[in-house]
C-alpha cells in the first residue's frame, strides 16, 4: 500500500500559478466533477480568491490511475506563498517527500522561488521544476531554463513545461510525480507518531486537525495525545481529505488525513506538533516543532465605543481559526478600549483586519505597526517592548536594539539605481548584488524589520513597475538609536500616535505626522498647536489657525470704535476658550498619521 502513495506539495513565488495548477490536478484526477468545480478550489476564503494568494495550508487526497494501469494515492498539500506564513510552509514540507517548484515562464525565477527552494532542500525533498504559463506570448522558456540551471542549480532537463490554465502537459506532470517522488517511509507496526501541519475550526465538530502519519497507525475511536500541550482526547472521526471529508477506519504510516476529537480551540493544536497514542505514547516528539512568534504589533480599536463588545467577540471567534494571532486588552485616551495584537507579518495584519471588517461587519482603527525591540536597562534587566506606551524612562536605558532581516530582491537590472536608493533610505547594510540572468539582478542586504513592515513592499513594486520580487528571513538584534516620538495636540499627548523610531528619522516622521493631522483636524475658534516631541524637546510643530467669525458683519456704518468694541469682545472670548478648550480628533486623523512622508 505504502509504495502506491505519493506525498508532495506545490511551492512558488506569489502569482506564478500554484493554485491554478492545483485546480488542474484535481480535474485530471477526477477528484472534483465539473458541476462542483470553481477556480481556486483549495482556497476557501474570499480574501484568498480576491487577492490571488493562499493564506491557509490545506490538503487533498487524489486517486490516480497511471498510464501503466496502476492505481496511486496522491496527497497534495497546498502551501501559502507569502513570507509571513513561512513557518506553515516548512511544517507542510515536513509532511512531504516531493515538491513541485512552479516558475512563471514570463517572469522567471524570483525571490520567493529561491527561498522556497532552499526550504525544500532543507527537508531533503525531491524537487521537480515546473515551468508554467508556456501558452503566454511573453513566455521566455529558454531564459527560464537557464535560470533554473544557473541560479537554482537544478537540472533543466528535469523541468516539466505546462500550462496550468489550459491543462497542457499536466497529464505528463502526473506521470513525472509518480516516477520521481519516492513513496513515504515509516513503520506501520511501530508506536504512533503523526505530524500536525494545520487545523481549522468547524463550528459543529470543533477543531479539524490535518496531519500525516509518520510512524505506526491510527484507528477511529483511539485515545490520542497532543505532545506539546500534553492533552489527551478520544477520537471521534478520522479520514481522508478529499474536496469533502471521507471517514476511514484507520490510517497507516505515510498517509495524510484529518482527525476530529472534540477539541474546542485551534490554539490547543499547534502546527508542527506530534500526535501519539495516549495508551502507548512515543518517548519523543518529531523534530522541527516551534512556537509561531509574532513579529509585528498593532492596536485595534472600534470606531465607536459601542462596538467594543462586538470587537471582543469577533477577535475571540477569529482566534478559533487563527492560532498565530495573539491579543490583549488595552485602553487609549484618544481611541478608548481596544486590543493590542501580534501578527506574523504585515500581510497577516491586513488579512485579520479585512476578516474582522467583512465577516463581523466592524469599522476599525489600527495604530501604526511596530516591531519587538529589545531594551537593556541600567539595573541589568532586559525587556522586550512591542508597545511605545510602555517605553521606560530614557535615563534608565543603557542600549536599545531592533530586529534585522536578511533581504533578497530580484529585478531587471534597469532598476538597480532606484532600488539601491530605497535600500539606503531604509538604513540597509552589507549591500551586495549579482547577475542571475542576462538582464536580471539579485540584491542582498540587511536592514531593520521596522523599515520593511509598513510600506517597503509597496514602494519596491512602485519603483520597479511591478517587476521587483522581495523575500526575507529573520536575522539578529542589533544596537540602534531608537527614541519615542510623542504627538501633542493643543499641548496634550495623544498616546495612540506615539511611535518608536530611529533618531535620524524622528524629525521627518514627526513633521509628516503633524502636517497630516493639520489636514484632518477641523478648525476651532482658537489656534491649535500640533507638536512632535522626544521627551521634553519639541522637534516638529505646525499650527491650525483659528476659525474667524465675522462679528462685525452686523455693524454697518458708524464710528470705528463700534467695530473695535466687538473685535475686543471676541478676542476675550477666544482667550477663555483657549484656556478650557478640548480638541476633538476625528478617527480619520489617526489613519492620516500612518501615511509615511518619505
Image (cartoon, rainbow, N blue to C red):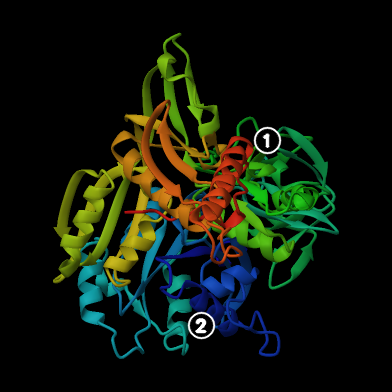
Asked if one can make out residue 188 in the rendered structure from this viewpoint, the answer is yes
Disc with the residue nearer the chain's start (1 vs 2): 2
Q: Residue at x 39, y 48 (%)?
A: 122
Q: Residue at x 38, y 33 (%)?
A: 538
In the picture, the quarter occupied by the C terminus is: bottom left
Q: Answer with left or right where residue 330 lies relative to residue 461.
A: right
Q: Residue at x 18, y 47 (%)?
A: 431
Q: Helix, strand, or loop for circle 2?
A: loop
Q: Nearer the viewer, mark 1 or mark 2?
A: 1
Q: Residues within 10 Å of mark 1 (few under 14, many from 20)?
A: many
Dot 2 corresponds to which residue?
A: 68
In the picture, the quarter occupied by the N terminus is: bottom right
Dot 1 corresponds to which residue?
A: 227
Q: Residues within 10 Å of mark 2 (few under 14, many from 20)?
A: few
Q: Is residue 240 above or below residue 285?
A: below
| Residue 419 drawn at (x, y percent) | 23, 59
| Residue 127 drawn at (x, y percent) | 38, 63
Residue in the foreground of this view, choosing between 13 and 100: 13
| Residue 529 drawn at (x, y percent) | 47, 42
Q: Residue at x 43, y 47 (%)?
A: 543
Q: CA distance from mark 1 to mark 2?
A: 42 Å
Q: Is residue 469 above or below residue 367?
A: below
Asked if one can make out residue 192 in the rendered structure from this viewpoint, the answer is no
Q: Answer with left or right where residue 432 lies relative to residue 117.
A: left
Residue in the foreground of this view, choosing between 40 and 294: 294
Q: Helix, strand, or loop for circle 1?
A: loop
| Residue 110 drawn at (x, y percent) | 31, 65
Q: Answer with left or right where residue 207 lies relative to residue 46.
A: right
Q: Answer with left or right where residue 386 lies relative to residue 104.
A: right
Residue in the foreground of this view, choosing between 535 and 42: 535
Q: Quadrant of residue 357?
A: bottom right
Residue in the foreground of this view, choosing between 580 and 149: 580
Amino acid at each position: 500500500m505504502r509504495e502506491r502513495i505519493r506525498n508532495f506539495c506545490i511551492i512558488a513565488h506569489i502569482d506564478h500559478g500554484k493554485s491554478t495548477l492545483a485546480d488542474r490536478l484535481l480535474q485530471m484526477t477526477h477528484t472534483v466533477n465539473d458541476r462542483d468545480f470553481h477556480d481556486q478550489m483549495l482556497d476557501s476564503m474570499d480574501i484568498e480568491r480576491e487577492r490571488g494568494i493562499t493564506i491557509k495550508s490545506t490538503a487533498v487526497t487524489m486517486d490516480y490511475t497511471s498510464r501503466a494501469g496502476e492505481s496511486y494515492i496522491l496527497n497534495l498539500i497546498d502551501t501559502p506563498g507569502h513570507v509571513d506564513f513561512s513557518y506553515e510552509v516548512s511544517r507542510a514540507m515536513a509532511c512531504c517527500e516531493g515538491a513541485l517548484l512552479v516558475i512563471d515562464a514570463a517572469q522567471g525565477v524570483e525571490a520567493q522561488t529561491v527561498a522556497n527552494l532552499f526550504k525544500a532542500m532543507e527537508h531533503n525533498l525531491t524537487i521537480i521544476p515546473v515551468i508554467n504559463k508556456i501558452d503566454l506570448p511573453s513566455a521566455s522558456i529558454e531564459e527560464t531554463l537557464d535560470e533554473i540551471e544557473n541560479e537554482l542549480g537544478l537540472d533543466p532537463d528535469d523541468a516539466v513545461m505546462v500550462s496550468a490554465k489550459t491543462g497542457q502537459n499536466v497529464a505528463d506532470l502526473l506521470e513525472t510525480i509518480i516516477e520521481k517522488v519516492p513513496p513515504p517511509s515509516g513503520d506501520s507496526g511501530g508506536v504512533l507518531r503523526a505530524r500536525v501541519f494545520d487545523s481549522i475550526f468547524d463550528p459543529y465538530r470543533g477543531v479539524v486537525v490535518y496531519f500525516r502519519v509518520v510512524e505506526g497507525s491510527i484507528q477511529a475511536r483511539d485515545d490520542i495525545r497532543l505532545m506539546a500541550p500534553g492533552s489527551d482526547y478520544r477520537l471521534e472521526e478520522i479520514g481522508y481529505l478529499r474536496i469533502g471529508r471521507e471517514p476511514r477506519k484507520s490510517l497507516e504510516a505515510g498517509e495524510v488525513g484529518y482527525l476530529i476529537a472534540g477539541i474546542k480551540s485551534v490554539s490547543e493544536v499547534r502546527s508542527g506538533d506530534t500526535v501519539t497514542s495516549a495508551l502507548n505514547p512515543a518517548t519523543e516528539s518529531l523534530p522541527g516543532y516551534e512556537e509561531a512568534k509574532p513579529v509585528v504589533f498593532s492596536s485595534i480599536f472600534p470606531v465607536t465605543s459601542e462596538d467594543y463588545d462586538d470587537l471582543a467577540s469577533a477577535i475571540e471567534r477569529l482566534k478559533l481559526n487563527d492560532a498565530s494571532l495573539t491579543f490583549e486588552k488595552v485602553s487609549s485616551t484618544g481611541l478608548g478600549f481596544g486590543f493590542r495584537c501580534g501578527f506574523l507579518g504585515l500581510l497577516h495584519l491586513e488579512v485579520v483586519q479585512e476578516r474582522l471588517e467583512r465577516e463581523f461587519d466592524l469599522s476599525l482603527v489600527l495604530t501604526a505597526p511596530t516591531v519587538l525591540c529589545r531594551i537593556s536597562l541600567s539595573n541589568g534587566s532586559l525587556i522586550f517592548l512591542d508597545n511605545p506606551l510602555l517605553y521606560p524612562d530614557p535615563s534608565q536605558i543603557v542600549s536599545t536594539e531592533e530586529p534585522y532581516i536578511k533581504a533578497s530582491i530580484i529585478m531587471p537590472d534597469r532598476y538597480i539605481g532606484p532600488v539601491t536608493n530605497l535600500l539606503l533610505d531604509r538604513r540597509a547594510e552589507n549591500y551586495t548584488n549579482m547577475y542571475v540572468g542576462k538582464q536580471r539582478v539579485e540584491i542582498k542586504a540587511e536592514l531593520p524589520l521596522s523599515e520593511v513592515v509598513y510600506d517597503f513592499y509597496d514602494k519596491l513594486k512602485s519603483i520597479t513597475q511591478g517587476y521587483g520580487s522581495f523575500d526575507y528571513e529573520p536575522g539578529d538584534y542589533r544596537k540602534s538609536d531608537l527614541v519615542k516620538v510623542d504627538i501633542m495636540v493643543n499641548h496634550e499627548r495623544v498616546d495612540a500616535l506615539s511611535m518608536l523610531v530611529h533618531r535620524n528619522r524622528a524629525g521627518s516622521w514627526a513633521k509628516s505626522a503633524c502636517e497630516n493631522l493639520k489636514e484632518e483636524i477641523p478648525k476651532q475658534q482658537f489656534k491649535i498647536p500640533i507638536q512632535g516631541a522626544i521627551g521634553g524637546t519639541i522637534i516638529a510643530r505646525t499650527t491650525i489657525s483659528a476659525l474667524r467669525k465675522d462679528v462685525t458683519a452686523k455693524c454697518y456704518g458708524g464710528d470705528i470704535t463700534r467695530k473695535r468694541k466687538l473685535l475686543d469682545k471676541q478676542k476675550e472670548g477666544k482667550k477663555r476658550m483657549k484656556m478650557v478648550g478640548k480638541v476633538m480628533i476625528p478617527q480619520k486623523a489617526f489613519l492620516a498619521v500612518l501615511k509615511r512622508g518619505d
